[in-house]
Image (spheres, rainbow, N blue to C red):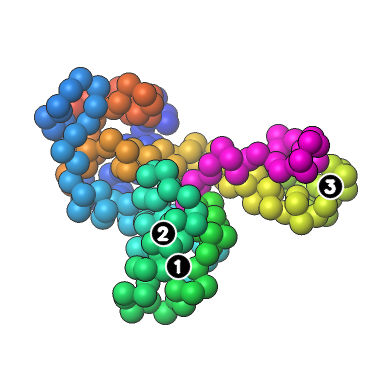
């Protein structure tokens, strides 16, 4: 078992409270099925709570709302759509958060809190027909080196407001990398084809889950 797999396993154990890896029946080779939604929901909320404790969050949303953001991300919903779902959810509950103040930017910040970055978040906008004002990789390098927004803007010859927007993406990528992407991977495994029934499933899809969980034996105690 490699280091990343071990860390992912430990994170699932912490989130689910189980030390047993169980393989359930699968409908076809390579794909996990029969996911228990209640157990998945609990594990997602536990991951959210663990991240809140470790990093702190930048929005007033509660853990349940953050869990909804994570679900929306892996359902390929846009930030506007997720924001609308959050407004509906908060309007029906007793949340102290004003639903009318929830917008796509709120969801974007919440996604970043959860280390859930879209590839499109890294695509620096350019005026029509022009080249982007800077390369995201350059901004990420400067951010990782500890440069401020103003310093990055000067180095890249770009507007500070533009730099600030993409620096938020860079900081998220850097934080996720420092955590070996284990939170992002755990959300992905829970909310795609991961099979959780009070335990960590041991199989993986051939399209990506295999690498994150390879070498985990089935029906053995961790």
Taking the magenta stretch, the answer to whether it contains residue 124 is: yes
Image quarter in which the C terminus is found: top left
- Which image quarter: residue 175? top right
* SS majority, magenta: loop
Asked where in the image residue 51 lies, by quadrant, the reply is bottom left
CA gap, disc 3 and disc 1: 32 Å
Q: Residue furthest left?
A: 25
Residue identified by numbered label 2: 66
Quarter of the image for the N terminus: give it: top left
- Please indicate, yes or no, whether residue 145 appears anywhere in the rendered image: no
Which numbered disc flags the more N-terminal residue, 2 or 3?
Answer: 2
The answer to whether the residues at label 1 and label 2 have Cβ atoms under 8 Å apart is yes
Circles 3 and 1, Cβ within 8 Å, touching? The answer is no
Going 42% across and 29% down the picture, which residue do you hit?
3
Residue positioned 42% across, 79% down in the render: 96
On the image, the x and y values in percent for residue 172 come to 58, 47
The numbered mark at residue 61 is 1
x and y percentages locating residue 58 in the rendered image? 55, 63
Q: Which residue is mark 3?
A: 158
SS label for mark 3: loop
Asked which secondary structure carries label 2, the reply is: helix
Q: Position of residue 8 (x, y in %)?
A: 37, 37
């Amino acid at each position: 078992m490699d280091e990343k797999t071990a860390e992912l396993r430990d994170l699932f154990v912490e989130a689910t409270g189980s030390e047993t890896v169980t393989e359930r029946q699968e409908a076809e080779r390579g794909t996990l099925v029969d996911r228990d939604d209640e157990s998945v929901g609990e594990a997602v909320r536990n991951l959210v709570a663990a991240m809140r404790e470790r990093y702190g969050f930048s929005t007033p949303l509660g853990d349940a709302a953050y869990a909804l953001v994570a679900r929306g991300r892996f359902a390929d919903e846009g930030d506007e759509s997720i924001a609308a779902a959050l407004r509906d959810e908060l309007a029906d509950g007793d949340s102290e958060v004003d639903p009318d103040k929830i917008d796509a930017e709120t969801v974007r910040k919440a996604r970043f809190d959860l280390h859930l970055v879209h590839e499109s978040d890294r695509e620096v906008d350019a005026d029509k027909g022009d080249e982007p004002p800077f390369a995201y990789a350059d901004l990420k390098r400067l951010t990782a080196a500890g440069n401020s927004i103003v310093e990055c803007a000067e180095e890249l010859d770009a507007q500070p407001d533009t730099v600030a927007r993409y620096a938020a993406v860079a900081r998220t990528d850097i934080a996720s990398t420092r955590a070996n992407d284990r939170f992002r991977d755990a959300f992905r495994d829970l909310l795609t084809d991961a099979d959780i029934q009070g335990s960590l499933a041991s199989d993986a899809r051939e399209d990506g889950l295999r690498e994150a969980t390879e070498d985990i034996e089935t029906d053995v105690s961790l």
